[in-house]
Image (spheres, grey):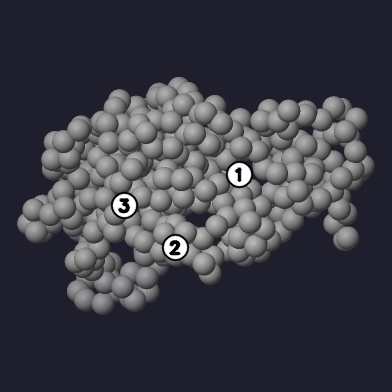
C-alpha cells in the first residue's frame, strides 16, 4: 500500500504559537484566526436585528482586531482591501482608530417605523449613521465601533441643469436651485451591511445555501460564513450607494410629503464621460430635474445611486459585451441585445433589485409620487415591498442618443414601462453603430 506523503508546511498558515513579522513595524506577533469561536474571540454582544431600541439591537462591530467583533467582514466595502494593503505596506497603523469628533450627520434622518418592521431592511444598518450618538458610551469604554453611513451637505452643478434653466423648465429659487445652476443637496453615503437570515429569506433560499454560495464563489475569502453560524451580520466587500436628497429631509416619513425618486445604477462611461451607447446619464439628469421640481413644490426628491457597474457584471464584462454586439453577424440590433450579454456573462443581469427597496424604507418612504424609471425590474420589487408608486416617468424621447436605441427597444420588448412595444421587425433592424464608426 502506498503511503501518502506528509504535506509540507504552508508558509501562509503558521504552526501553533508561531509568529510573523513581515514588513510590519514592531515586535513579531501571531496571526489570529477568526474562523472559529474562541480563536478569533466570541462575539460579546450578538446583533438583535430589527429591534426598535438601538441599545437592544446593539452595535455592528466589524473592526479587525476588535475583540468583541459580532460581524463577518469589515468596514468600507470594496475599499477595505485598500485599507489592508495600506497596513501591509506600513503606511497605516493597524491600531488606528478614527477620530469621530464633529462627524455626526449634517441632517437627522429617522428613526422611522420601517427600521423595526420585520424584513423591511436587511442590506444596510439603519442605525449606521448614529453611531456616536447611540453607542457613544461603548466607544468611550474602548470599543471600536464605526459608522457605516455618513450624512453631509453639498452643492452639485451639472450642465444639464443650466440647460434646463435656459429652456425655462427649471427656475432658480435660491433655496433648492441657485441662479448659477447649483442645486443644494443632502448627501448620504451607505456601506452594505447584510443581515444574512433576512437576505436569504428575500431570495427564497436557506441561510446555509446563502452562506455556502458566498463562501465558495469568493474563493473562500470569508471562512466565518461556514464556520461561524453565530455571526449573522456580514459586511460584504462590494460597492455601496449614495443618496442625493433635494428639499428638506425633515419632511421624510410624513404622509403629506410628495416624493420624486430615481433609482440609478452606476454607469461610469455614460454618467461621467457621456458615452452614448446607453441612456444612463440622460435619464439620471432628467431624474435630478424632476427631483428639483418636486422639492421646489414643497416635496422631497431622492436620487439613489448604486455602485452596480454594468448591471453588477463589471465594466470588463460590459465592454466585452459591447464588442460582441458590434461585431456579431447582422450588426448591433435589439433582438440580440440580451443574448450577447448572456453569452459573455451567463446571465442578463446581476443587480438583484430584491435588495434595492431597503434604502427607501430607511428613508421612511411609503409612497413615491413620481418614480423616474421605466424599469420593471425596479418597479416590481418596490411595489412588492409595500411602497405605493403613483406615477412612472419615462425618459423623454429627445434625450435618447441614437446609438442607445438598441438598448431602449430591447428593454421595452422585455417589459419596460412604455405605451409602444417594438414588434419583431423593429427589433431586428440594425440601429447601433459599427465598432469602427
Q: Mark 3 points at which residue?
A: 148
Q: Is mark 3 on a helix, strand or loop?
A: loop
The residue at the point 16 percent across, 36 percent down is 53
Left or right position of 411 against 26: right
Compare marks 1 and 2 and give the one earlier in the sequence: 2
Camera-side residue: 229 or 337?
337
Q: What element carries label 1?
A: loop
Between disc 2 and disc 3, the foreground one is: 2
Q: What element carries label 2?
A: loop
Q: Is residue 66 above or below residue 20?
A: above
Left or right position of 38 against 182: left
Is residue 305 in sight in this rendering? no
Q: Name the residue under label 1.
A: 311
Compare marks 3 and 1 and give the one earlier in the sequence: 3
Q: In this view, does 216 lie above or below 160?
A: above
Camera-side residue: 100 or 182?
182
Give the percent coordinates (x, y) of residue 372. Answer: 57, 40
Amino acid at each position: 500500500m502506498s503511503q501518502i506523503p506528509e504535506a509540507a508546511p504552508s508558509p501562509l498558515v503558521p504552526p501553533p504559537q508561531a509568529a510573523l513579522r513581515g514588513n510590519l513595524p514592531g515586535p513579531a506577533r501571531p496571526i489570529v484566526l477568526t474562523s472559529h469561536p474562541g480563536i478569533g474571540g466570541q462575539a460579546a454582544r450578538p446583533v438583535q436585528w430589527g429591534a426598535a431600541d438601538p441599545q437592544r439591537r446593539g452595535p455592528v462591530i466589524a473592526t479587525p482586531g476588535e475583540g468583541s467583533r459580532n460581524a463577518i467582514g469589515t468596514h468600507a466595502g470594496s475599499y477595505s482591501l485598500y485599507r489592508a494593503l495600506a497596513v501591509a505596506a506600513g503606511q497605516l497603523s493597524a491600531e488606528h482608530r478614527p477620530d469621530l469628533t464633529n462627524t455626526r450627520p449634517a441632517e437627522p434622518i429617522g428613526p422611522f417605523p420601517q427600521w423595526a418592521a420585520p424584513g423591511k431592511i436587511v442590506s444596510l444598518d439603519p442605525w449606521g449613521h448614529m453611531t456616536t450618538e447611540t453607542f457613544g458610551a461603548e466607544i468611550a469604554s474602548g470599543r471600536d465601533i464605526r459608522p457605516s453611513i455618513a450624512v453631509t451637505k453639498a452643492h452639485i452643478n451639472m450642465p444639464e441643469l443650466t440647460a434646463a434653466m435656459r429652456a425655462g423648465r427649471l427656475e432658480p429659487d435660491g433655496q433648492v436651485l441657485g441662479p448659477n445652476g447649483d442645486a443644494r443637496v443632502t448627501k448620504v453615503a451607505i456601506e452594505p451591511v447584510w443581515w444574512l437570515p433576512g437576505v436569504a429569506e428575500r431570495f427564497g433560499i436557506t441561510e446555509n445555501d446563502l452562506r455556502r454560495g458566498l463562501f465558495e464563489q469568493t474563493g473562500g475569502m470569508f471562512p466565518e460564513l461556514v464556520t461561524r453560524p453565530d455571526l449573522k451580520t456580514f459586511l460584504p466587500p462590494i460597492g455601496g450607494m449614495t443618496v442625493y436628497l433635494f428639499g428638506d429631509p425633515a419632511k421624510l416619513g410624513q404622509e403629506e410629503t410628495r416624493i420624486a425618486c430615481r433609482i440609478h445604477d452606476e454607469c461610469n462611461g455614460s454618467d461621467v464621460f457621456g458615452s452614448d451607447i446607453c441612456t444612463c446619464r440622460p435619464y439620471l439628469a432628467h431624474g435630478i430635474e424632476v427631483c428639483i421640481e418636486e422639492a421646489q413644490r414643497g416635496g422631497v426628491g431622492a436620487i439613489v445611486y448604486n455602485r452596480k457597474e454594468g448591471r453588477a457584471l463589471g465594466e470588463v464584462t460590459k465592454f466585452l459585451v459591447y464588442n460582441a454586439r458590434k461585431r456579431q453577424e447582422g450588426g448591433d440590433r435589439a433582438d440580440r441585445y440580451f443574448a450577447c450579454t448572456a453569452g459573455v456573462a451567463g446571465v442578463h443581469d446581476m443587480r438583484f433589485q430584491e435588495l434595492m427597496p431597503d434604502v427607501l424604507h430607511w428613508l421612511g418612504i411609503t409612497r413615491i409620487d413620481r418614480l423616474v424609471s421605466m424599469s420593471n425590474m425596479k418597479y416590481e420589487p418596490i411595489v412588492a415591498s409595500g411602497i405605493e408608486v403613483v406615477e412612472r416617468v419615462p425618459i423623454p424621447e429627445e434625450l435618447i442618443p441614437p446609438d442607445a436605441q438598441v438598448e431602449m427597444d430591447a428593454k421595452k420588448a422585455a417589459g419596460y414601462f412604455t405605451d409602444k412595444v417594438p414588434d419583431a421587425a423593429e427589433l431586428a433592424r440594425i440601429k447601433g453603430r459599427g465598432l469602427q464608426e
